Image: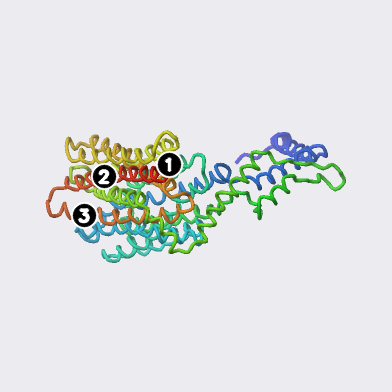
Amino acid sequence: MAKTSAFDQRYYFSIYRWLIQVPLAKGISFLYTDGLYKCLWPKVLLFYIQMAYTSDIDHGYAWVALMATFSIQFIIGVISYSTGVINIAIMEEVEDDITKTSWIGSTLFGTYTLLGPIAGVVQQKVGARITAMAGGLLMLLGMSVASFCQTVIGLLLTYGLIAGVGLGLGANVIGVIPGQYFRKRRPAAYGICMAGCGAGLFVGGPLSQYLLHYYKLHGTLLIMGGIGFNMCVAGALLRPVNPDGTCRLENVEELETQKCIVLKTSENDDQMITSQFDERSFCLVKDVQMRDMEAIECSQEQPICKRFHIFRQFPFWMYSLSIMLWSLGEAAWIFHLPNYAEQKGRSPAEAASLLTAMGAGSMFSRVFAGIAASDSNIDAVVLQVGLSGLAGIISFLFTVGPFTYGSLLARSYLYGTYSHGINSLIGPIIINLLGLPHVAVAFGIVCFFCGLGNLLGPPIASTLYKRSGIYEYTYVFAGACLILGSISTALTNICRLRKSMQCK
């Protein structure tokens, strides 16, 4: 190795001195000059103090919470929508009976939605952060133990039940947080949040196929448990909603006395800097404190048995029924798609890529549906009627025509586009029907009905296929359920309008 000369050493030292040492020293000296210290640091402190009294609603930490719920939804999408691909591996390595193995995936689907009412009560008691982190721990536990199971019963209890409970806790969180942190663009926030599940569907199929190719079934389940454990990281970001800033006040009168903040710039300077809250921030704090927090606190003080009085409202009951019918068709559609594609002559990689196409349409639809529902001229219930009906028609068309790879890919994309936008409308519709204070328990009840559909959809479709030997009946059944769900959603709007007319 050539030895560095003295000239080279001086040359490198000069570069270091003039590019790093001198600018750094000058910058530090400039930052601590008296003039800049007096005019800069108090303004920075005043900025953060004003932020302490500024609401998180619609801005600030609301976007952090939204990205956290997007991440949770992404994890749920990866794990739940990979069941169809994993079911093929279970049939190859554990037991070759599609009726029995379909109960594993349907139990995962059903458990995480059937536990919606319990998850809603748990979230109201312990908060969104602990609920989401508990869900991540349960997913890690269930999937890790499932990686050692060699029987259908063992996979049913671990991969289906324990991991499903973890998914259920996380699913209820994502249905509540956007409604608490956003008011002006609440449907759009739900759309962005629900797009995480579409992204999970986009990634879940190819990822599970890749993991199964290199790590087989049990290694894939273990890695999926690690992916689910990341819900704890996202859940840790879900701090309690604080509409009146981080500095909580006992009442609005106390806020009025603290509208002026006085800081002393230095010990040797008598100059005082006074910062007045702008009227807009103050009015926002006052409005939120007098309306939203009062309503939420009143709902939290109610006994558990009184919280379920919302179930007696007929429009909400009809909407829950429509969600159950939609989930019946949705679960059967997604669960059997990879195996159906392989029955039509497609390779395992091509069959898994159909889920990717569906995920691409799902991401677009979830965001678009949320933005569309933000428009006051568009009724979210009417939008859901159209989306569910079109998804049912596409499901019928899935049984006819050419079964080439391109044709299946296009129809999978269209189905994801029309069917999955409904996920972004559930939260806003519940809030419109019942109000924000009841959204946690109401969302849990809707998830319960969704769980009934997710639990029963795949086994019913599997039974139809096993007894008839015609796989197309699976998608005829799914299409019929989606059409009936569209009709039930229309009845929800009719009942709501009739009730509002009676109140007038």
- Whether residue 293 can be seen here: yes
Disc on res. 191? 1
Instruction: Report x, y in % for residue 336.
Output: 24, 49
Scheme of image coloration: rainbow
184 and 488: which one is in front? 488
Q: Residues within 10 Å of mark 2 (few under 14, many from 20)?
A: many
Which of the 4 image quarters holds residue 161?
bottom left
Instruction: Report x, y in % for residue 147.
Output: 34, 62
Q: Residues within 10 Å of mark 1 (few under 14, many from 20)?
A: many
Q: Earlier in the sequence, mark 2 or mark 1?
A: 1
Q: Earlier in the sequence, mark 3 or mark 2?
A: 3
- Whether residue 199 can be seen here: no
Q: Residue furthest left?
A: 468
Three-letter amino acid code at the position of disc 3? Ile
- SS category of the residue bearing label 1: helix
Q: Which residue is mark 2?
A: 482
243 and 253: which one is in front? 253
Q: Which residue is mark 3?
A: 460
Name which residue lies at 64% across and 38% down.
280
Q: Quadrant of the N terminus?
A: top right
Instruction: Report x, y in % for residue 261.
Output: 75, 46
Name which residue lies at 81% across and 46% down.
264
294 and 249: which one is in front? 294
